[in-house]
Amino acid sequence: MSTFDRLFWPALRCVWSRWADVLVIVKPETVVGWHRAGVRLYWRWRSRPRGGRPKITDEIRTLIRCMAEENAGWGAPKIQGELLKLGFVVSERTVARYLRRLRRRGDPGKRWLAFLQNHREVIVAFDFFTVPTVTFQLLYCFFVIEHGRRKILHFNTTRHPTAEWVVQQLREAFPEAVPYRYAIFDHDSKFDAEVIGFLMATGLKPKQRAFRRPGKMGSRKDGWGVFGARSWTMSSR
């Protein structure tokens, strides 16, 4: 750099502090703004509607409303099954979404608690809980409990629970004719059609608990979880 340059540029800086702006064709803020606008346009294009799931017809809505009003104890699984018998193909989730818009008679939570109270001597329930071992692995404990007296009828543990394994445990829990009428369980994927078929063949009426259904099953399961953590964690070393 020459002597003239050393004198000229500092002097220009003192006279005109923003002289460097005229040398910038595109400012960084402009480039960032273009990029953000491009990102918005891209995701708007990716999220554009592409048809989606077809809407249910007015006839199906009317049937769902009539079934819900005339049968206060029916939930989405029961109504969806009845619609399939009539030849209407509709998913259980769609029925449940439409049921939430209806004002049904009575409180479903109170009806469920009344059912548990009135049939407590003929209800059994089964579920899983997990027990961590000292090696940071999980054991899955399956148990069958009598609702009335809170008596554990059967329990076992496994590292890899499947529907076939659950059916085998139910065979061991109910080897003969049982005095129970209802079997309560949740929507676990392991409790599939094979499990439900075995229950019906045994003479038990399956009743799947709805999500967030009130009841005492959770507290009993938690208590058994403490016992299992003390017992099987030590035995799995």
Image: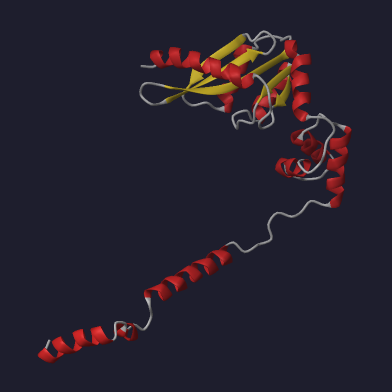
Is 119 in front, or is 4? 4
In the rendered structure, the answer to whether residue 223 lies left or right of residue 229 reads: right
For residue 148, above or below residue 21: above
Q: Position of residue 66 (x, y in %)?
A: 88, 39
- Which quarter of the figure has residue 220? top right
In the rendered structure, the answer to whether residue 13 lies left or right of residue 221 reads: left
In the rendered structure, the answer to whether residue 159 lies left or right of residue 18 reads: right
Write the residue at 79% across / 25% down: 111
Quadrant in the picture for the N terminus: bottom left
For residue 123, above or below residue 130: above
Q: Position of residue 222 (x, y in %)?
A: 55, 19
- Which quarter of the figure has residue 126? top right
Quadrant in the picture for the C terminus: top left
Q: Report whether residue 169 is seen.
A: no
Write the residue at 68% across / 57% down: 52
Is 111 in front, or is 73? 111
Q: Position of residue 95 (x, y in %)?
A: 76, 42
Write the residue at 24% across / 87% down: 12
Q: Position of residue 85 (x, y in %)?
A: 82, 38
